[in-house]
Image: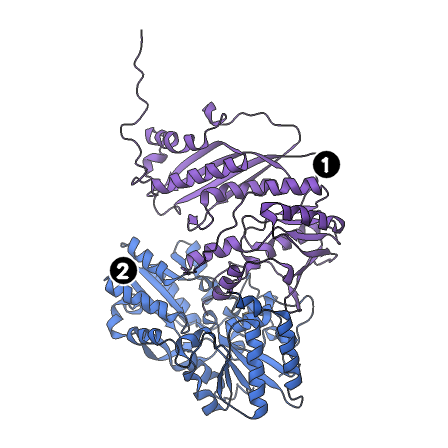
Chain colours: A blue, B purple
Amino acid sequence: MKYVTEFRDQHLAHQLAQTIAAEVDPSRSYRLMEFCGGHTHAIFRYGVQQLMPPNLRFVHGPGCPVCVLPMARLDQALALLHEYDVTLCTYGDLLRVPASGRQTLLKAKAAGADVRMIYSTQDVLQIARTEPHRQIVFLAIGFETTTPPTAVLLEQARALQLKNLSVLCNHVLTPPALRAILTPSLEHAMPLDGILGPSHVSTIIGTAPYECVPRDFHVPVVIAGFEPLDVMQAALMLVRQLNAGRCVVENQYRRAVSAAGNLRARELMARVFVIRSSFEWRGLGFLPDSVLALAADYADFDAERRFPVSVITAPEPSGCDCPAILRGLKEPTQCRLFGSACTPDHPIGACMVSSEGACAAYWTHRAYLAPTAAAET
Amino acid sequence: MTLTPLSPAPTAPLDLVHGRIDLTHGAGGRATAQLLDTLFKPAFANEWLAQGNDQALFSVPPGRLVMSTDAHVVAPLFFPGGDIGSLAVHGTINDVAMSGARPLHLAASFILEEGLPLADLARIVASLAQAARDAGVAVVTGDTKVVERGKGDGVFITTTGIGVVPDGLLISGDQARPGDAILINGTLGDHGIAILSQRAHLGFETVLQSDSAALHGLVADMIAAVPEIHCLRDPTRGGLATTLNELAHQSGVGMRIHEAAIPLQPAVIAACELLGLDPLYSANEGKLVAICPAAQAETLLATMRRHPLGTQAAIIGEVVADPLHFVQLRTRFGGERLLDWLTGEQLPRIC
Ligand code: SF4
């Protein structure tokens, strides 16, 4: 377990920072997007950006599962609670995310709805078994990291023939989101020079799914761990690729990620889930083939079939720049609500809720009184 | 003439192996009396409880009295390093002791959920009684209520403690002064991370232990060596970060903390990396923050390190003048950032 401490070593950090400063080409800029909320958190918690030369900037990506869930899906969960007397289980971060009219699952819970915060899908199984008279709905969210546990839950539910458990599936896929970020569009006029790829997600899916990024978009990818030194090391690897005119997928997080990923987890996911043809992401809009739905064998456990609700899609809260922040177009400090109307105590957008959200990370680890440098545009 | 006394004992003895709490245990009748007589009274046995009244009558030593109360809810009820019973004793004793007081007595109320296994209750009561005995305090009065299934989380325990503060001490959250040193008695986040990794079903090889402990003995040594201590506080919920912010606010000062000086267990660091948690915001149940004049800091540190609950004590920062009462952290990487209050709850990362 000792390596974690070593990875936080200040001395190493300074050496790396010096190497990066020496190797960057002063005549160009390096805009590197860290995909995951875990990276964003590390960058802020340890002040990694301050250690970088001024022409190297981290752009925060959409890899925070809570942040990309569109409000309509939360409204759907709330409607389900309202219309059917079910027990809704989900991960804690989601409870505080504002839905339409600043309603949250936490408020619904306080008003009497049966909402339970769980730490693992095994908690859901436990609840379903000990409370057979209740209908238990698991509001499943997350990227490929949290998908295998949901798949295990569904297999268990089927084996046990549980009639009171269903899943409202919002498991999203990383590669389509990456493609959406990189696809040039009018509103997305800021090109990215490199991508720090997901660490935990890649332990499941491997590095192969990213090969399309250098091939189709000419942007190099380095899979990076969540420790601050991992992030710096990956930044250096990207700088070296860019300086040498190389453009490939590299793996900094070798201690956990292999090219093929976790075969067993991938097989399990393939058995339990199918790809849904279209799904709306907050900030990224409707993306084709970007989310998982339950496979035909598991259709009985699909909460959307068992408890149909009609939801009117609500617009995002006005003034909230989450969509632009999730695309890397804006920095949190450029949102006029940041730090005034919107703080982690009173979040307006999802990016201010989870510690993986860019706005929350920015606010929580802000520097003392120092006005945050405006994003270069 | 001799009268045969009516047997006060209900017909069937309590089944402490397979029995469960039901609503009659809280109805105030025979079943309640049986529960108290079999389970609670023998465990806590002391002269004040033996008075058999609804209140405990005792005389108090001269000096100023302090009183504190704490409601304890924890899931799981049993965790590595303790359970809700020992926690209920340590939590309240520590709150009393943070004034510099010697704790005297405790009161304990139990809210039991219908269906709670009696075996679990017996374990909890025994653990609470043992923790009180180890700490040299008596549970002199108490109460038990039963709520319907689904209206409680197994057991809730509220404990209230009183203690006496020796003359001449002024230990209070508003006494921190610029220039003072900030000390901690050991590794941070142990309790919170132990509980969360249990809940997240992390199969760690080495099980993380809660640091739950009664700190009044350590406090007694500390005030004997350095009576000039300005503040003492136990960083429980919200962790070190929250406690430092509270103290900074109360005293109207700022603080500078050195992250590299903060003691952390390697297993806690590893669990935090895995779960995406921050040990500085995680609960502790056997830790205290002490603030004292810089001139006494080394003496205090040496005293703490001599005590079994302070072997890893460290000076972690200093109090500074700051009209905005900010707590700043110099990170391991050499950067400076705010160490803000905890918002919401500490939750495992799902990314
Ligand atoms: S600061 Fe708040 S309102 Fe602004 S983009 Fe972030 S979450 Fe939305």
**Would you identify the image quadrant in which residue A106 lies?**
bottom left
Q: Is residue A107 left or right of residue A48?
A: left
Residues flagged by tags 2 and 1 on a common chain: no
- Label 1 packing within 10 angstroms: few (<14), some (14-19), many (20+): few
Asked whether B237 or A235 is in front, the reply is A235
Q: Nearer the viewer, residue A147 or B215?
A: B215
Whereabouts is ligand 1, in terms of quadrant?
bottom right
Which percent across, then down, holds residue B86? 48, 42
Identity, as a three-letter code, of the amino acid under mark 2:
Asn
Vertical placement of residue A150 versus A106, above or below: below
Above or below, comparing residue A145 to residue A131 in the picture: below
Q: Are marks 2 and 1 in contact (CB under 8 Å)?
A: no
Q: Is residue A90 visible?
A: yes
**Residue under pointer 1:** B168
Three-letter amino acid code of the residue under disc 1: Gly
Q: Position of residue A335 (x, y in %)?
A: 59, 73
Please state the horizontal and vertical placement of residue B175, each as a whole percent of the image. Answer: 71, 47
Q: Which mark is residue A113?
A: none
